[in-house]
Structures are given as structure tokens and as C-alpha cells.
Image: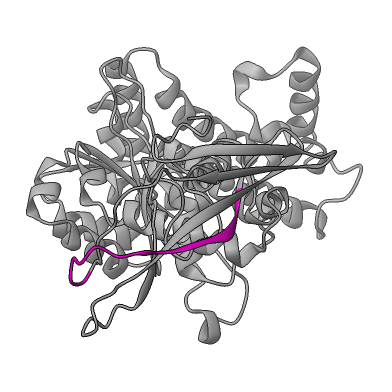
Amino acid sequence: MLLGLSEVSVESVERAETSMTVTVSTPWHRMGCPDCGVVAPSRGRRRRVLHDVPHGDVRVRLVWRQRMWRCPEAGCPRGTFTEQVPTLVAARGSITVRAVAWAIGQLRREHATIAGLARRLAVSWWALWRAIKPVLERLAGDESRFAGVRSLGVDEHIWHHGDRHVRGPKELTGMVDLTRDEKGRVRARLLDLVPGRSKKAYADWLNERGEAFRAKIAVAALDPFGGYKAAIDDQLADATAVLDAFHVVKLGTAVVDEVRRRVQQDTTGHRGRKGDPLFGIQTILRAGAEHLTDKQWARLTRALEANDAHEEVFVAWQCAQDLRAAYHARDLADGRKLAEHVLNSFHTCPIPEVARLGRTLRRWRDAFLAYFDTGRQNNGPTEAVNGLIELHRRLARGYRNYDNYRLRMLLAAGGLTT
């Protein structure tokens, strides 16, 4: 019972400075042939060495005195066979079941790596991964993990930088559960990763989930990418598409930077250099007005007043602040009014970059305003999941196998329930 398994008894424990050896066996019992059922005589035991969960910094080995039998029936093809204890170790395995569960927990909660855990267990990378992979595949194949999804986010990321003809598409589309709990908090978890960044990649995944899954999706958050929007319109006709707030504000900030660079080139004839008024405020222009100190306001004012042409930069910055203010409004009704003002005014702005942003937002009008009608639903938690994915990709120093990558990221980002 020292191992917590009623089927296995501990015979002895030997402790060294850096290792511990635990000898175990099962009680005697009558055994019939698995094929013909005839009671089989014993053929003795064999020693089978297993790797178990480390005890602190001490490696633990289990020596299992495994029983063997021989079928006495002449016509039975079975011959000899050995006992199996599935709760101790898988057939032909060398790592105990609880060591596999411990390794999976370390991978998920402690951001460990397969290589690091393999060193602690004194096994090879492949030996550990061969023990873990079937468990993750079984969990990934369980369709019940998609139950209860009401809000869905989607985003893409680059999973490798090699030759796409050899390793396939560099882009993966990730689907994230953004459903809020009873307290209104989002417990984001990665649902799946599929190759490609296109309408087809997202639409095919939604189609595979079935009508029952799609019918329950009420909100679908996304970045301003037409492919994903087309997939939502095609497969999630009853869901409300919500444009991500972060990316909308990012578009506004990018417009300010474009105007600043254009005005810089027009007034000086060169790119920004140290000492140029507009070059010295490029980071200030990316900040929210409410966060600026008196010193920063003074620097901003001096730079904008240095040349009448800098007025365009100020107007673009004001527009970006108006866009940002819509999302920061405490009351959603007030925020929607500010957003509608942005939609009605930006496209008429004489500054071409601002007018282009206005036209873009008008094309996404319904998804842009949906943020204020859905209780601030957004794709932010999806970006957080992407951060976890990037962390584990860096820890592993990259991946070469898509299937292994998908399973590891599903585990790390909460997509698999263990």
C-alpha cells in the first residue's frame, strides 16, 4: 500500500545518495490462460525495472517482480504470458502510470519541458513522450471538452519559420473558449489548432464540430481579418461577431505613426533623426492622453508647435484618442455614442490616413459596435492564450512536428482536462 495501489505490495526499499530502489510484487493468485481459460502453472518471475516519480532530487526506480505463467493446453497458441497491472504501468511500458500523470501535471502547471522531465526520470526524450502522447491523444479526441462553449475567439500565430513546402503552413488558426463563468470571468482555454490562416481553415473546423455546437455559440470575437469574418457569417449565422478592441486601438495608433512619418519626410526631407521635433515624441504619441505627465505634455506641445505642418499629426493623435476613449468609457451607452461619432466623422477627415481608417471601421460597423452590446466581449483572452503558446514554444526551442506541437499547446493552454 506504500504506492497507493491495492494490487501491489512493497517488498523492500534501498536508499542511496542519489537514487532509491523499491522492489514490489503482487500477491499470489490463481491465473487462467487469457485465450483458453485453462488454469496455468507458474513459470516463476522476472525483474522489470520501472521509472517512478522522483523523491525530491532522488531518482526512484521500481523493480517489479513480475509473475509469469505457461498455458498447459497443447492446442492453445498462447504459450507463456506475464501478469499485467494497468494501474502500475502500461503494457510494455517503462514509466509508471503515476509518473506519467506527474509529468503531464508538470508540463501543464509548471511550464516544464519534456527534456527536463526526462532527465529527472532518467529516461530518454522519446521514452517519456511515447508514454505521454497516447494520454494526450485520448484527451484531445474527447468531444465532451467542447461542451458548454458559448463564446468563441479566433486568432492566428506562426508556429515555425522553416520551409512551408517541407513542414507545411507556417500559420496556425487557434480557437479559444471565451465563455464567462457565473461570476462573469473569462476562463480562456485553447480548443484547437488547425493549419492555415483562412476562411476555409476556420469554417472547416466549425463544420466538424457539428450543428449542436455551432447553435450554442452566441458571440464570436475576432481580429479585423475578412477570412475569419466570412467563416463566422457562413457557419455561425446566429452568433454576434465582435471586433477585438485591442486591434482597433492598434489601428488608430498605427495611423498616428503613419501621419507622423509622412509629415516628417515632407518637412525635413529625411526620416526621423535625433533632434527632430517629431522624432522625439514618437513614444508619447502612442500613449493615452490621461497617462501623460506635465513634462510629456510640454514636450508634445513644443514639437507640435515647431511647424504649422505638424497640425496634421495633432489631429491624427486626437482621432486616435477619441477611438480609444470609446472603449474606456465607463458606461457602455456613452462608449457607443463615441464609437458612432467615430464612424460618422473619420471617413470625412482631410487627412488620408484617418479617412482610410474611417472607411475600414465603417466596413466593420456591426462588429465594431457589437463590443458595446455584448458586455465588452473581446479577443483579449485569446491573445493571452497566444502568449502561453509562445512561452512553451520558446521553452522547447521550437517544434518540428505539428501533431506534437498541437498536443503540447492544448495541454499548456487548458484545452485538455486531466
Position of 93 compared to 69: left or right?
Answer: right
Q: Is residue 214 left or right of residue 1?
A: left
Q: Which residues are magenta?
A: 35-51
Color style of the picture: one colour
Residue at 47% x, 47% y: name it: 97
Residue 330 found in image quarter: top left
State left or right for residue 126 relative to residue 248: right
Q: How many numbered markers are drawn?
A: 0
For the residue pair 18 and 252, the one nearer the viewer reads as 18
On screen, residue 325 versus residue 284, left or right, reads left
> Residue 216: percent from the left, percent from the top?
12, 41
Q: Is residue 327 above or below residue 369?
A: above
Q: Which one is in front, 411 or 106?
A: 106
Magenta segment includes 269: no
* Residue 350 visible in the displayed image: no
Q: Position of residue 33 (x, y in %)?
A: 25, 67
The image quadrant where one finds the C terminus is top left
Where residue 141 appears, as percent x and y from the top left, is: 28, 57
Q: Quadrant of residue 415?
A: top left
**Above or below for 168 versus 11:** below
User: Does residue 341 appear in the picture of this structure?
Assistant: yes
Q: Quadrant of residue 146?
A: top left
Residue 244: give x, y in percent of width and height: 39, 40
Outermost residue toward the right in this view: 275
